[in-house]
Amino acid sequence: MKGMAERTDRIPLIVDVDTGIDDSVALLYLLARDDADVVAVLSTAGNVPTAQVAANNLAWLELCGRTDVEVAVGADGPLSTPLRTTEDTHGPQGVGYAVLPEPRLRPSERSAAEAWVALTRERPGELVGLVTGPLTNLALAIRLDPELPHRLRGLVVMGGAFDYPGNTTPVAEWNISVDPEAAAEVFAAFSDVPHERSPIVCGLNLTERIILTPEHVRRFAELAGSTPTESISADDRPGTRSTASNRVVRHVSDAVRFYFEFHRDHAQGFIAHLHDPFAAAVALDSTIARYRSATVDVETDGRITRGQTVADWHGLWGRSSNAQIAWETDEKAFLDDLITRLAGLARRIERQS
Ligand code: BDR
Ligand code: CA
């Protein structure tokens, strides 16, 4: 996390995801960046069940030749409630219309929670955590080892909605809504971590401004040298598959087409909100956004407000601040960077195959 620690070396990351279309793009973006050192990819049940999340993570990593990265499976579901998944948002396998090659590698033997604990013990103060799914695995890890928050160099979470509507209930964002107890435990666990290492939280208030369009996909494919011109149109038959010559382009295009259709079907236009890739970029360089400090807590009881993230901006609770809430960024600069880097990755993978 460059902005936080002022270091210029590669940033070692623990990535905890519920892959997921935008989680997929986030993972590819990290693999595309040479300042990112993805140490482990941990799988949380959320968008799809945890075994499918792990299979997706392995498949993307193998596609990119990164068979060296550990993938661990997380808990089957939230801490204390049944799992809800959202295949209508992310497709039957969580990767939209993409059909990824069956992974040959298996997940590691240890659980995702065990991996969080073990990796941060091996490298205290070095690792940045990035969570773009429910906080179940991290909460379980902190139950195993309450000192864990003090061993992270930083934590970036995609979750919540601050002074902004939810996307799962009128007030709750998906990642928090799936496991509010886990989120509440994690925020509480970071309350005595020094302010400069408070979790960075990327909520819908900012991530819904990260808007991918078919034009971005066209440019991404062009930069990757893929043929023919990658054209995704709202007028296409739903589920039209890409014929891109470049494999990464083809799979990404098939994945995000599903996301475009989902957003369109929910009256948001033929676009896709790239929540998780933005959080990934922040994990590598927090200076790309501006933040507001607050004490964040999560409603776990409310009859109609369960899963709401509440930010106390003015210290009314008398509790110290435990979060830096991402508030502003240059959305265009981020999207330009995203497609340029993804194209570089796609080009490189094609060359290597
Ligand atoms: C979050 O929910 C998931 O469906 C996305 O992958 C993202 O992490 C947005 O609310
Ligand atoms: Ca996600």
Image: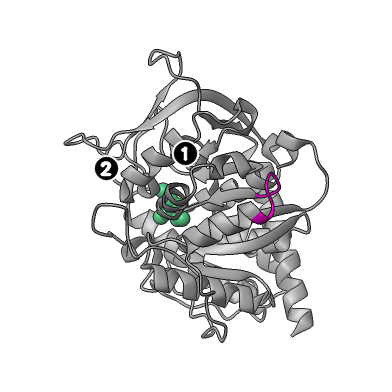
The amino acid type, in three-letter code, at marker 1 is: Gly
Q: Position of residue 270 (x, y in %)?
A: 44, 55
**Does any portion of residue 171 appear in the rendered image?**
yes
> Quick one: label 2, few (<14), some, or many (20+) residues within 10 Å?
some
129 or 286, which is in the foreground? 129
Residue underneath mark 2: 169
Image vertical order of residue 347 relative to residue 338, above or below: below
Residue farthest right in this picture: 8
Q: Residue at x 30, y 40 (%)?
A: 307
2 or 350, which is in the foreground? 2
Give the label on residue 203, or none: 1
Rendered-image quadrant of the C terminus: bottom right
Q: Residue at x 55, y 56 (%)?
A: 116
Give the label on residue 289, or none: none
Span colored in magenta: 122-127
Rendered-image quadrant of the N terminus: top right
Q: Position of residue 20 (x, y in %)?
A: 45, 63
> Quick one: label 1, few (<14), some, or many (20+) residues within 10 Å?
many
Q: Position of residue 151 (x, y in %)?
A: 62, 43
Quick check: is 125 in the magenta stretch? yes
Q: Residue at x 56, y 87 (%)?
A: 104
Instruction: Determine whether the residue tagged by mark 2 lies in a helix, strand or loop.
Output: loop
Q: CA distance from mark 1 to mark 2?
A: 14 Å
Which quadrant of the view contains residue 59?
bottom right
